[in-house]
Image (cartoon, rainbow, N blue to C red):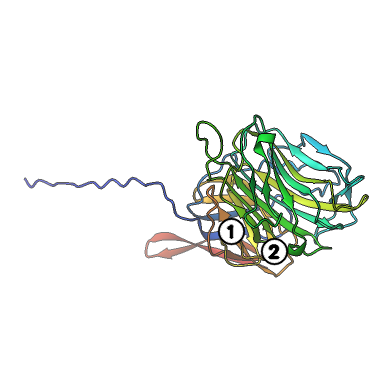
Amino acid sequence: MRNHKWICFLFIPSLSLASPSITNVTGTFFGQATDQIVVTITGVDFSTKSPAAPVVFADFEDGTVNPTSLGIITAWNANDGPLISTTTKQLINSSHSILGTWVSPSTSFSFQLKHISTFSFIYSFGRRYHEADLTGNQKVWRLHRADGGGTWVVSSSGDGVFLNEDCSGNQLNQFQDIQSKIDEGNFYTEEHIWSHGSYTGADWIVANGYWNYLVDGFSVQKSTSGDNCDSQSTEIRVWDNFSNVGVVDGAHLWMDDLYVDSTWSRVFISTVSTWTENGTGGRREIQIPNAWSDTEVQVYFRQGEAQADETWYMFVCDHTNSCNSNGFEITIGESIFETETDSFVGQGESVIKGTTEIR
């Protein structure tokens, strides 16, 4: 009798540190998030995100100041100052935005989130339209800590664009003086990508915090040094809009399409085909995830201001802020679905899968 020896190879997958890669995108690339049109993105190294939904998403299309039901939080903890739904200034394909008015130079109007006890990572996306100069002491994005501690860290260029102010005063602020970097009289897009520094046993002063502030797809200021506050931060104020100088009483500011999450994992489409950490410009539209695994992400598609027949590119970013460097091309208004066609080879049946494009 002949002895047969079998050799079994056991392959154990290791944790991949590769950037996300998209192999296919299917669905209908049209409509807004509240239409809940599902687009499926397949690929590898998307990492995981649980829950898949963002902390909050508010497009204000229902004529109120409330967030939509597509995020975890559907009501603001507070919204300071005079904030009203309006139809006076609108993005393309939008019917409502939020109007804030300064009634004195020191009035602050903001949306506040206190529902999450700690923040270690934050990503936010939103749009603003200014009618007044931005040369004042205007705090547009703020974290509050539960305790003291921390240090001052100012902009390395000293240009006033970016200031992590006084965590020992229980808050981290961004000051804004970006008049030369925005297209005044139009809505512009802002993104904040933030993480806290490490704890040394005495204070949160290790120089590995991160904060990248992007305007219209370009990084206008980035900080990777000093204390970027800590995971004890208990409140985020977005569009804080505080100003004590440089803003005329009665001046207006419009806000729209607010997305906030406690992870850097996200999906967006862009008119630019490549992604880099410091931005490549172009128009961007955030997408609203509803299911997320390492190999498949589902989103409620948002065309935002995208127009029919325009070419855009899909990007998936993981929790480390690593994104596919080359976007997956889509056409607005197009539908792509998986199809199955039966064919016969000899006496066996095989299934051929492909895609069908509907314009």
**How many other residues sit within 10 Å of disc 1, few (<14), some (14-19) or many (≥20)?**
many
Left or right: where 136 falls relative to 200: right
Q: Quadrant of residue 109?
A: top right
Return the residue at label 1.
315
Residue 234 visible in the displayed image: no
In front here: 238 or 158?
Answer: 158
Asked whether disc 2 touches disc 1, contact meaning CB atoms under 8 Å apart, the reply is no
| Spot occupied by residue 39 in the image (x, y as percentages of width and height) | 62, 54
Return the residue at label 2.
283
In front here: 202 or 101?
Answer: 202
Q: CA distance from mark 2 to mark 1?
A: 13 Å
| Spot occupied by residue 353 in the image (x, y as percentages of width and height) | 50, 61
* Residue found at the far top of this picture: 147
Secondary structure of residue under mark 1: strand
Left or right: where 121 falls relative to 99: left
Secondary structure of residue under mark 2: loop
In front here: 252 or 295?
Answer: 252
Left or right: where 8 falls relative to 52: left
* Residue found at the far left of this picture: 1
Instruction: Say if 342 sits above or below 298 in the image.
Output: below
In front here: 158 or 335?
Answer: 158
**How many other residues sit within 10 Å of disc 2, few (<14), some (14-19) or many (≥20)?**
some
Tell me the quadrant of the picture where the N terminus can be found.
top left
Under mark 2, the amino acid is Arg
Which one is in front in this view, the residue at disc 2 or the one at disc 1? 2
Under mark 1, the amino acid is Phe
| Spot occupied by residue 280 in the image (x, y as percentages of width and height) | 62, 65
Tell me the quadrant of the picture where the C terminus can be found.
bottom right
| Spot occupied by residue 314 in the image (x, y as percentages of width and height) | 60, 60
Residue 163 visible in the displayed image: yes
Residue 101: numbered disc: none
